[in-house]
């Protein structure tokens, strides 16, 4: 499960990296740039959720033993 979580985090970072190349800082919320902002925010949310999942799984393992 840890490998899956780290893979998802890595893919989210790759998608965020690609989306930053699409950004147009002159018109940040128009067209493709607006979509890129939404993708970046979604990717950051995914990374936060995966971090919470990793933390909760480690707490659960410590609680069992």
Image (cartoon, rainbow, N blue to C red):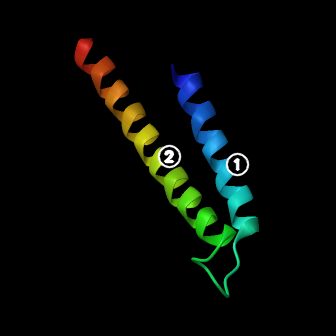
Could you tell which of marks 2 and 1 lies nearer the N-terminus? 1
- Residue 28, image x, y percentages: 61, 79
Above or below residue 27? Residue 31 is above
- Residue 61, image x, y percentages: 32, 18
Where does label 2 land, which residue? 47
Please report the residue visible at 23 percent of the width from the left and 19 percent of the height from the top.
63
Q: CA distance from mark 2 to mark 1?
A: 12 Å
Q: Which mark is residue 14?
A: 1
Task: Classify 10 Å Cα crowding around label 1: few (below 14), some (14-19), many (20 and above).
Answer: few
Please report the residue visible at 69 percent of the width from the left and 65 percent of the height from the top.
20
Give the secondary structure at mark 2. helix
In the picture, which quadrant includes the C terminus? top left
Q: Which mark is residue 64?
A: none
- Residue 18, image x, y percentages: 74, 57
- On the image, which quarter does residue 53 sit in? top left
Above or below residue 32? Residue 59 is above
Furthest residue in direction front, as rendered: 31
């Amino acid at each position: 499960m840890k490998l899956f979580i780290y893979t998802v985090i890595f893919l989210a970072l790759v998608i965020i990296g690609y989306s930053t190349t699409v950004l147009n800082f002159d018109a940040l919320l128009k067209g493709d740039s607006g979509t890129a902002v939404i993708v970046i925010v979604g990717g950051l949310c995914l990374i936060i959720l995966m971090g919470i999942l990793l933390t909760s799984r480690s707490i659960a393992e410590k609680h069992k033993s």
